[in-house]
C-alpha cells in the first residue's frame, strides 16, 4: 500500500470515528466523483441518513430513483426515512409501491402498517399486518402492532 493510500484511508477512518464527518468532506477525501448510477446515490443517501441528515438523504434517494424507479432497496430506505421524519403519508405511497413490486415482502407490509397508523388509519394498518402474518405467521412484531392498535 502506498503512503498516499494509507494517509487517505487513515484520514477517512479518523473522521468517521470522530463522528463529525460531513458527506462532502468524506467524498472529497475519498476522491469521490459525482454519482452516475442508482447505487451511488443510494450509498450517499444511506450515509446521510446515518448522520441524521434525513432531508439530504431523501434527495439522494430521489436521484437514485431517476436511474432506477423500481429499485426496491432505495424505495425501502426512502420509506423508512419518511417514517423517521414523521411523514407517514409519503411513507404510505412508498410502501404501497413496494408491495406492488413484491407482494410477499413482509417488512414492507409491516412498515406500511406503521405508516397507516401514523395517518390515523387503524383499520388499514391492522389489515396489512394481518397480510404480513399470512405470509409469515412466525413474525412477532405484526402481532404486537395489532395488539397495540386494538388497545387504542
Image: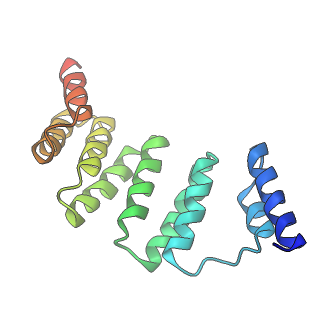
Task: Please name the residue shown 57% across and 51% down the image.
Answer: 49
Task: Please name the residue shown 70% across and 78% down the image.
Answer: 33
Q: Please state if 95 lies on the left or on the right of 11 as rendered.
A: left
Residue extending furthest right? Answer: 3
Image height of 15 relative to 146, above or below: below
Q: Position of residue 87 (x, y in %)?
A: 43, 45
Task: Please name the residue shown 56% across and 60% down the image.
Answer: 45
Say which quadrant the N terminus sits in.
bottom right
Say which quadrant the C terminus sits in.
top left
Q: Please state if 145 lies on the left or on the right of 47 as rendered.
A: left
What is the image's colouring? rainbow
Image height of 24 relative to 64, above or below: above
Q: Position of residue 12 (x, y in %)?
A: 78, 58
Task: Please name the residue shown 77% across and 54% down the image.
Answer: 13
Q: Quadrant of residue 113?
A: top left
Residue extending furthest front? Answer: 1
The tally of labels here is 0
Image height of 113 relative to 58, above or below: above
Q: Please state if 53 lies on the left or on the right of 39 as rendered.
A: right
Q: Position of residue 116 (x, y in %)?
A: 27, 41
Residue extending furthest top? Answer: 151
* Viewer-side residue, 9 vs 146: 9
Q: Please state if 15 lies on the left or on the right of 37 as rendered.
A: right
* Viewer-side residue, 49 vs 117: 49
Amino acid at each position: 500500500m502506498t503512503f498516499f493510500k494509507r494517509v487517505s484511508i487513515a484520514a477517512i477512518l479518523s473522521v468517521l470515528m470522530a463522528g463529525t464527518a460531513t458527506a462532502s468532506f468524506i467524498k472529497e477525501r475519498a476522491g469521490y466523483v459525482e454519482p452516475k448510477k442508482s447505487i451511488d446515490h443510494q450509498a450517499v443517501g444511506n450515509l446521510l441518513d446515518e448522520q441524521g441528515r434525513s432531508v439530504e438523504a431523501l434527495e439522494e434517494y430521489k436521484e437514485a430513483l431517476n436511474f432506477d424507479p423500481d429499485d426496491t432497496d432505495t424505495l425501502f430506505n426512502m420509506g423508512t426515512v419518511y417514517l423517521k421524519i414523521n411523514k407517514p403519508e409519503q411513507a404510505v405511497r412508498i410502501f404501497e409501491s413496494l408491495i406492488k413490486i413484491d407482494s410477499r415482502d413482509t417488512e414492507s407490509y409491516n412498515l406500511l402498517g406503521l405508516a397507516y397508523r401514523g395517518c390515523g388509519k387503524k383499520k388499514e394498518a391492522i389489515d396489512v399486518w394481518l397480510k404480513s402474518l399470512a405470509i409469515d405467521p412466525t413474525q412477532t412484531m405484526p402481532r404486537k402492532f395489532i395488539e397495540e392498535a386494538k388497545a387504542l
